[in-house]
Every structure is written in structure tokens, then in C-alpha cells.
């Protein structure tokens, strides 16, 4: 199992929605991969912390007022007249009705698919977090490589300079020899 596989199934792993074989594959990978193990620990802590938020119940009066205002039994209340007065409907173009229908279908689709969306958002959040963790660890490795390079850089410059000077000398000697051969051939 790769780090990318762990990122893709992290939500299911933490929610215990994996088969026994998949869970075992995750355990084997986590035993040998420190960044993934760290990511699982941190995301698990984050999920636990979010689970400790208090559940807020709305007051009973609020529920009653909402039911009262949205009830069809209310006298004189007509849904279409409330949102689409007859005079206003005559001035609106068909595009308005088409756009409204699309919005209604989208809203209904979102409501019906809310669980899937939340699950995808959860997965994408975990993936973004794990990518950030991976970038962090790669940045640390890069910092270490740069510090090693800083130590070796002066020696590399000296070697490069000496090699450059030697190359120039060789080039000049070669050109000088070719010139002498050219003069001997003409003379």
C-alpha cells in the first residue's frame, strides 16, 4: 500500500469502514512509514477534538415559529403568490424561469446528496492535510540538503575554478599547436 492509498482511504480507516484485509494493509504501511503514521495520529486527534464540540439544540419556541410560518394551513398564504406575484411574472423572461428551475434541481440534488458531499469534503480535507504534511517533511529534507550543500559549496567552487583554468589552458595550447602546424604547412 502506498502513501497515496493511505491518503485516499484515511477517512474510512478512521471511521472503521474498511475490510479486515484493507485495515491490515494500512497497519503494515503505517508500521514502516513515519509521515503516514504521524498524519493518522494528527487527523485522528483532530476528529476527536471536533467530536467534543457541544451539540446545540434549538429552543422549542423556534421550532414552533418555523412550523407556524411555513404551514400551508395558514390562511391566505400561497407559495407561488409569495415568491412570484402575478404582475411580476408577466414581466419576467423565460430565462428567469429556466434559471430558477435549474437552481431548484441543484438545491434538491445537493440536499439529497448531502451525505456524499460531506464524506467527499472530509476525504479531500484529509488529502489536503496529508499533502501538507508530506510537503512539510520534504521541506525539512530540502533544508538539510541545502545546509549540506552550503558546507560543500566552497570546495566545489575551488574545484570548478581549477578545472575551468585547466580547460582554458588546454584550449589555448591546442589552438597554439594548430596555428604552428598551419604556419609550417604554408611555409
Image: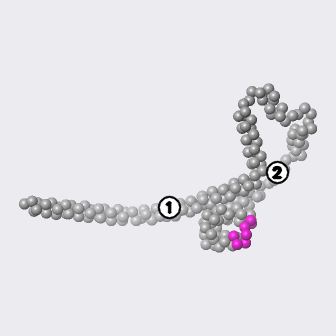
Measured Cα–Cα span from mark 2 to mark 1: 46 Å
Residue 132: image location, x then y, percent: 60, 58
Residue 13: image location, x then y, percent: 71, 65
Residue 74: image location, x then y, percent: 91, 36
| Residue neighbourhood size for the residue with mark 1, other residues' Cα within 10 Å, grouped as few (<14), some (14–19), many (≥20) | few
Q: Which residue is mark 1?
A: 143
The residue shown at (70%, 70%) is 23
Considering the image in quadrants, where does the C terminus appear?
bottom left
The residue shown at (72%, 53%) is 117
Considering the image in quadrants, where does the N terminus appear?
bottom right
**What secondary structure is marked by label 1?**
helix
Q: Is residue 175 above or below residue 64?
A: below
Q: Give the image quarter of residue 184.
A: bottom left
**What secondary structure is marked by label 2?**
loop
The residue shown at (75%, 27%) is 91
The residue shown at (74%, 65%) is 17
Q: Give the image quarter of residue 102.
A: top right
Residue 104 lies in the magenta stretch: no
Q: Which residue is mark 2?
A: 56
Q: Is residue 24 above or below residue 111?
A: below
| First reached walking from the N terminus: tag 2 or tag 1 | 2
Q: Is residue 65 above or below residue 92?
A: below
Query: Is residue 176 or residue 34 the one in the foreground?
Result: 176
Residue 174: image location, x then y, percent: 20, 63
Q: Which residues, given as a range, are shown in magenta?
A: 16-22
Q: Is residue 37 left or right of residue 51?
A: left
Amino acid at each position: 500500500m502506498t502513501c497515496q492509498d493511505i491518503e485516499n482511504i484515511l477517512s474510512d480507516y478512521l471511521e472503521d469502514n474498511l475490510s479486515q484485509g484493507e485495515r491490515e494493509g494500512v497497519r503494515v504501511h503505517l508500521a514502516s512509514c513515519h509521515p503516514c503514521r504521524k498524519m493518522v495520529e494528527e487527523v485522528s486527534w483532530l476528529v476527536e477534538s471536533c467530536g467534543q464540540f457541544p451539540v446545540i439544540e434549538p429552543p422549542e419556541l423556534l421550532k414552533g415559529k418555523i412550523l407556524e410560518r411555513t404551514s400551508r394551513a395558514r390562511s391566505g398564504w400561497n407559495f407561488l403568490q409569495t415568491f412570484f406575484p402575478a404582475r411580476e411574472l408577466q414581466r419576467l423572461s423565460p430565462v428567469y424561469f429556466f434559471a430558477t428551475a435549474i437552481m431548484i434541481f441543484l438545491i434538491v440534488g445537493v440536499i439529497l446528496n448531502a451525505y456524499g458531499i460531506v464524506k467527499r469534503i472530509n476525504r479531500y480535507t484529509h488529502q489536503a492535510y496529508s499533502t501538507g504534511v508530506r510537503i512539510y517533511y520534504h521541506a525539512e529534507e530540502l533544508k538539510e540538503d541545502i545546509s549540506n550543500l552550503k558546507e560543500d559549496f566552497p570546495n566545489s567552487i575551488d574545484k570548478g575554478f581549477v578545472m575551468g583554468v585547466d580547460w582554458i589552458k588546454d584550449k589555448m595550447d591546442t589552438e597554439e599547436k594548430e596555428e604552428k602546424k598551419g604556419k609550417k604547412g604554408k611555409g
